[in-house]
Image (cartoon, rainbow, N blue to C red):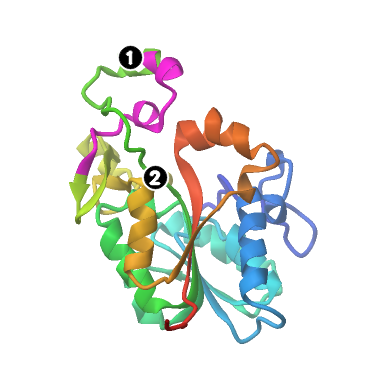
Amino acid sequence: MRVEFTAHNIRLDDGTLTKPEVGHSMDRYPWFISARRILEVVFHGSKSQLRLVDLGCLEGGYSVEFARMGFQVLGMDIRESNIAACRYVKERTNLPNLEFVHDDVWNVARYGKFDAVFCCGLLYHLDRPGRFLEVLSEITRKLVILQTHFADGTGGGTDWLPRLMRRALNPILRTSASKYALSRPVRNESLRGRWYTEFASDARFRDREKLKSSSWNNRRSFWIQREYLLEAIQAVGFDVVLEQYDSLGPGIADAMLQGLYKTDSRGTFIGLKTNLTL
């Protein structure tokens, strides 16, 4: 299978980069920097005995950087093309603590428990995200990092509007519901949120191996409303629940008021098990 890198610019051991046109390597990606900060806060000192799983690892870039931090890392992805890229990277980096597996993330419990879970760009591609959070709690000893879209609870949806009208209105509405044609707010798994159509036709569903920014088996996905997402993380067993904003860069206020945080409704959410009883 032809190896292609669509998103991860990984620095290999010989100094070459997998996607140099990006301009900076994976260790400078804001989402990695943000994850590294919380990981260093939670896990002091040597990480050689700590297990971390990177769910929906795409081309393996985050997995590589977590392995370079010292974690025992398992990267998991369902697309054969992504795993081919991961294997290419594995062969060109001296990281015996890094492993990749071709599997559905719903099967993650087969691989044991992990001290940390990194779930980036995945939760919002599921139609049962509430159940998946339960799975994550079952396999997580300490920390889960969720980098995900979420739904806002204001106004209606725009999925009922013609596509050209949605595009015309989006600069005015400037919300994720209009940008992504999300449904009106509804409930799913007792959680409030909005539905997103992953595959608008049978042809696109059949071509899902190539559509890397889509789900796998479910044809629509559910974006949990931010407030309910925070509550759901707590409900499944993480007694400390945080939202981490430093990945937005120095302009946090601007990003939240009118930038990508507002228009894309995407953030970093932290669940932590302290094992403290009150």
Drawn side of residue 269 relative to residue 205, left or right: right
Q: Position of residue 143 (x, y in %)?
A: 50, 71
Would you place residue 29 above or below residue 183 in this image?
A: below
Query: Residue sitting at 33 percent across and 69 percent down?
Result: 236
User: Which-is-in-front pick, marks 2 and 1?
Assistant: 2
The image quadrant that residue 154 belongs to is top left
Q: Position of residue 14 (x, y in %)?
A: 79, 62
Would you place residue 271 above or below residue 206 in this image?
A: below
Q: Is residue 175 magenta?
A: yes
Would you place residue 65 above or below residue 116 in this image?
A: above
The image quadrant that residue 205 belongs to is top left
**Separation (CA) of disc 2 from disc 1:** 24 Å
The residue range painted magenta reads 169-186
The amino acid type found where label 2 is placed reads Phe
Residue that label 1 marks: 164
Q: Is residue 180 magenta?
A: yes
Q: What element does badge 2 sit on?
A: loop
Q: Position of residue 251 (x, y in %)?
A: 67, 36
- The quadrant in which the C terminus is found is bottom left
Q: Is residue 94 visible?
A: yes
Drawn side of residue 191 relative to residue 46, left or right: left
Q: How many marks?
A: 2
Query: Residue sitting at 67 percent across and 54 percent down?
Result: 26
Q: Residues within 10 Å of mark 2 (few under 14, many from 20)?
A: many
The amino acid type found where label 1 is placed reads Leu
Q: Position of residue 35 (x, y in %)?
A: 61, 60
Q: Residues within 10 Å of mark 1 (few under 14, many from 20)?
A: few
Q: Which mark is residue 150?
A: 2
Toward the bottom, the furthest residue is 49
